[in-house]
Image (cartoon, grey):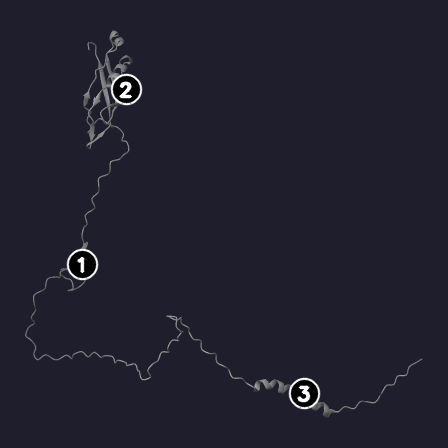
Amino acid sequence: MFEQVFVDTRARTRRPAAVALSCAGQVVLIGTMVLLPLLRTEAIVPNPLLQILMPPRHGGETQAPAPETRSPNRRTSATAPRVFEPHPFTQPSRIPDRVVTGPDEPPAIFSGSGGVSSTGVSNGVPFGIPVEVPRVVPPPKLSPPAASSKPQAPVRVGGRVQAAKIRRQVLPVYPRLAREARITGPVHLEAIIARDGVVRSLRVIGGHPLLVRAAVEAVEQWTYYPTLLNTEPVEVLTEIEVNFKLGE
């Protein structure tokens, strides 16, 4: 029932020379595989130059632009700088006894243009900068103000405004009741005379009630000459007094 197992107790013998030779062969093989691509080099092929293609002018073939040729014998000629040599001073042969001076020249006068004028000065430098004297420009003429289209307020009589002159005057009718009652006296009215001379409005300032209506009806029929102010007709605000006396 029990199986028998046999174990070989003999020690295996090792060969050091074979192991060393095997390792050396593997190292040489690996080194050859690594160095072989480095020993073989390939030449670098230059890329062809790109040519600029120009469109044909008359449907012909495209021609490449001709390369610019330079003459090898052409040399740039450098111009030598010119040296300025002033004339040397020479000693005069004799010395004059006195120095002759000419008459003084008047200051130069420069004619200006536009709005300035140029004149010289007595102690100035000849051919120097002229002195600019501005001219006084007259102010522009102001146009008269245009007549305003807005209606103006009536001008009150007095001062420089004279009273309107009556063209047509209607006498008032004496009221019957006032005549029987022997009532007399003035009636004061304030009137606005239009530009055409017609009485435009009336306002009673004072007077007897029995006399007011007759005075208003009479004054409404009055007409005046137009009152002028600066040659223009204007409305006038004036006061009118109507006197009632018995016997009229």
Residue 204's x, y, as percent? 28, 19
Q: CA distance from mark 1 to mark 3?
A: 108 Å
Name which residue type carries label 2.
Answer: Ile
Q: For the residues carrying marks 3 and 2, which lies nearer the camera in this image?
A: 3
Q: Could you say which is closer to the camera, residue 66 or residue 159?
A: 66
Residue at 72 percent of width and 90 percent of height: 19
Q: Could you say which is closer to the camera, residue 47 or residue 39?
A: 47
Tag 2 residue: 205
Tag 3 residue: 26
In primary-sequence order, the first of circles 1 and 2 is 1
Residue 219's x, y, as percent? 24, 18
Residue 72's x, y, as percent? 33, 84
Q: Is residue 58 left or right of residue 12?
A: left
Secondary structure of residue under mark 2: strand
* Quadrant placement of the N terminus: bottom right
Q: Is residue 97 left or right of residue 78?
A: left
Name which residue type carries label 3.
Answer: Gln
Residue 216's x, y, as percent? 26, 17
Tag 1 residue: 131
